[in-house]
Image: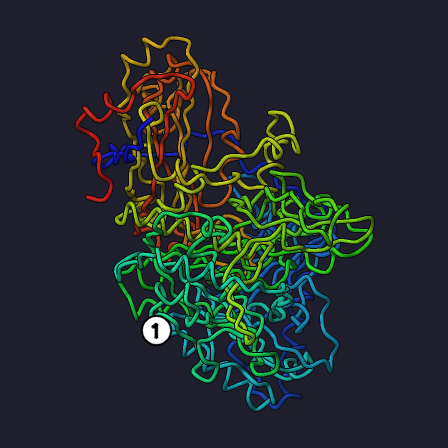
Amino acid sequence: MTDLSHLRLEGPGEPVPYTYAGGGGAGEFHLPPRDRFPHAERLKADIEHAQAEARATRQQQGLPEEGPGEVVVIRSEVNFELRLDSLERRTSGIELLSVSTRDGVTAAQVFVPRGKFVLLLRIVEAYETKVSARSGQPRNRLLVESIASIRLAAVRDFWQDTLAFPGDAEQIWWEVWLRATDGAPPTEVHGRFVGVAAPLGIRVSEQLVAFPERVVTLAHGTPESLSRSLDLLSLVAELRKAKELASAYRDLAPRDQRAFVNDLLARLDAPPEEAPAVCILDSGVNRDHPLLSPALAEGDAQTINANWGSGDDQHQHGTAMAGIALYGCLTEVFPRRERVTLRHRLESVKFLPPPPGTNDPKDYGPFTVQAVARVEIEAPNRNRAVCMAVTADDRDLGMPSLWSGTVDQLCSGALDETRRLMFISVGNLREEIFLPEYEYHRWNCERGGVEDPAQSWNAVAVGAYTERVFIEHRDYQGWQPVAASGDLCPTSRTSLPWPAESQAGWPIKPDIVMEGGNYAEHGADRAAIDDLTLLTTALSPDGSLLTTISDTSPATAAAARMAAMIWSQYPRLWPETVRGLMLHSARWTPRMVARFPGDSKASVQRRLRCYGYGVPQLQRALWSAENAVTLIHEGELRPYHKVDSEIRSNEMQVHRLPWPTDVLEALGEAQVTMRVTLSYVIEPSPGRIGWMRKHRYQSHGLRFDVSRPLEDENAFRQRLSRSEWDDPEERPENAAETRNWVIGDQGRTHGSIHSDWWRGTAVELASSGLIAVHPVTGWWRERPHLGGWEKSARYSLIVTIEAPELEIDIYTPIVNQAVIRTELES
């Protein structure tokens, strides 16, 4: 079959009014048993006590009797929820700050402005004395009866980390999430905190990261020092411990292969200046390496701190990453005799400090922002795949962190309207793999959770698999590979250890897996040996030019390399589209399917959370063929609009696919496959407020749906949108779904990229030529005061139909239709 360019689906989809057509619901909200009047009296006493305690504490601290406001803790009964949506009263300045659940008790931290405690009292008094004429129930019943107690907040109540709370005198770096709801510039919010913290002996970092309604910085001090001022606590929304990097990268012994390097240089064609780049955020890159200097200009080797320099440290991790990002594994390049034409470049930013002790705050969110800004200033119009194989730990259990939220914000372009494509490793098991009790694969799935910031929604999280299983070195005769060919790299982490609630609500991670090498074992001994690793670049004091590398680092570099290669072929694609093509091209190996066998949705979900969508295939990502056609549409829709004072869903986009209907119908019962991938990015709101309704993490969500074989266009529209119903009170009958989508409409909706596929008859495909993209809710809609409801959401839709067992041309009939363009780069 011929390599043919993918096809661009031209023109926008047809905008159709969209209103959610129903199905599902919030379910009943369960309340603990209450005796109405005594319960109201207890809560009123709690509120009055919190006020009195605040006044007494302020007097002890030498503060004015009435400050800007106080934070109270509102707690539920054990195993009951709080009515969180009713806690916030924005018009009165009462603000929900954060939510945590421990031992079955939900605790909400709520800021109450000066003079507004009386409003809390009125809410409880209305419950005690008034009845709703509509329901016959006490006013505010759901909120008031869900509350067990109310008290003034202490420092410990702001803690949102899974680590143990530090001792009163323990000096640590805190990650401080500040309230930023008054519209003040982030620097002003930061300045207020510095002004209160400095007199208390609390050292505050100059760095900050801004999110919707939050500004995050680092502060060094003890719990006791933070507790000395209620005015300081009134500025805070959350506290976490600042992250320490897991920096145990193993530098394997280099090989002196200078002759091979010189041979490759003799047949190397350097990339053009305007070529796309892989940007490596790491420990720096030694650009003097002869294999790297042709693709890494001096101005593209940068640092976020001039005192650090831009060169690599003694571990050579960044330089080793660069070799993989440019060439792939060098063992696959050296033996070739043909010329090697590089079509992408390298960029490097040293954002890891020199050896520990030279940089106190471990705040890699701002470091990441600074690093990306450096390369964008140097080459603002260059397509780049940002590669970061640096992770912290897995204590966030899949929930957003400062670092992952910063990554999501960078990718979304929320601050500067520049979308970015980032690749992050899921992290590695490290010393665990050398423990005698280590059990391959079970530990990866039960103990090795994805590390921060790879839980990001918008970045591509890269795990590692391996096909390296042959051991030839004489020193390791009798040793066996730990992993079988096609299975998980022994160190690669997965999202299977995440708690059930994280797996239910957060993205599939990893997104993909790439080659990361293997480990060898002999009895209880295990080792990373050269035969099972990847060969790459190093610049060592002894003159060696080559080393080996393994685990998720080279896998991440290889993924970024693939993205740059896609961009070199299709330079006008959006970052969302390149990301989508990579996942769209991925396939599970037979070993991955055997590890989680069967077609049940539960088994498929476990396979996804171990291997992502599998191993991306460059040929599929780059080319269509006569019997395998990929259509790409880049478009946008307005998810929400305002009707009177209410924010509602606005529209969906319906796309008519240029199917070769006659050809497909003529194929009859022949088997074909249809795969659909929807890729977009969200704006994050990473504060731990509970992520319920108006406090969702994602700004918006999109979904795709494909017309069913026995469904005409009118029925398709009516199934998705109530706005299309003939009678708004009567649901039309829906055609049954006869296709078996592999992942399913429930399992594919995690995160901000959704991919699924089905295999069926050509006749079924011929009558399934409509795809709709429609919105689901997010904080753009639920928090209208932030103005997000006015924004458009852009998306990439990728559709492939293929008949791999048939010698049939379905490409030409599609090209002959006017709704496509054959050249994506034009």
Image position, residue 781 (x, y; %): 39, 49
Q: Nearer the viewer, residue 262 or 423?
A: 262
Image position, residue 807 (x, y; %): 35, 17
Query: From where the camera sits, is residue 235 visible?
Result: no
Which quadrant of the view contains residue 442?
top right
Residue reaching furthest to the left: 818
Which quadrant of the view contains residue 226?
bottom right
Q: Report how many numbered discs are placed on residues in the image.
A: 1
In the figure, 161 relative to 751: above or below? below
The C terminus, quarter of image: top left
In the figure, 43 relative to 398: above or below? below
The N terminus, quarter of image: top left
Under circle 1, the secondary element is helix
Q: Nearer the viewer, residue 433 or 717?
A: 433
Kind of residue at badge 1: Glu
**Which residue is the site of mark 1?**
298
Using a 10 Å C-alpha cutoff, classify the residue at mark 1 as few (fewer than 14 neighbours), some (14 to 19) or many (20 or more).
few
Residue reaching furthest to the front: 259
In the figure, 184 relative to 478: above or below? below
Q: Viewed as shown, does residue 800 lie left or right of 613?
A: left
Image position, residue 447 (x, y; %): 71, 51
Q: Viewed as shown, does residue 481 lie left or right of 197?
A: right
Query: From where the camera sits, is residue 769 visible?
Result: yes
Question: Residue visible at 29% across and 57% down?
Answer: 275
Q: Viewed as shown, does residue 496 lie left or right of 193?
A: right
Image position, residue 184 (x, y; %): 38, 74
Describe the colour scheme in one phrase.
Answer: rainbow
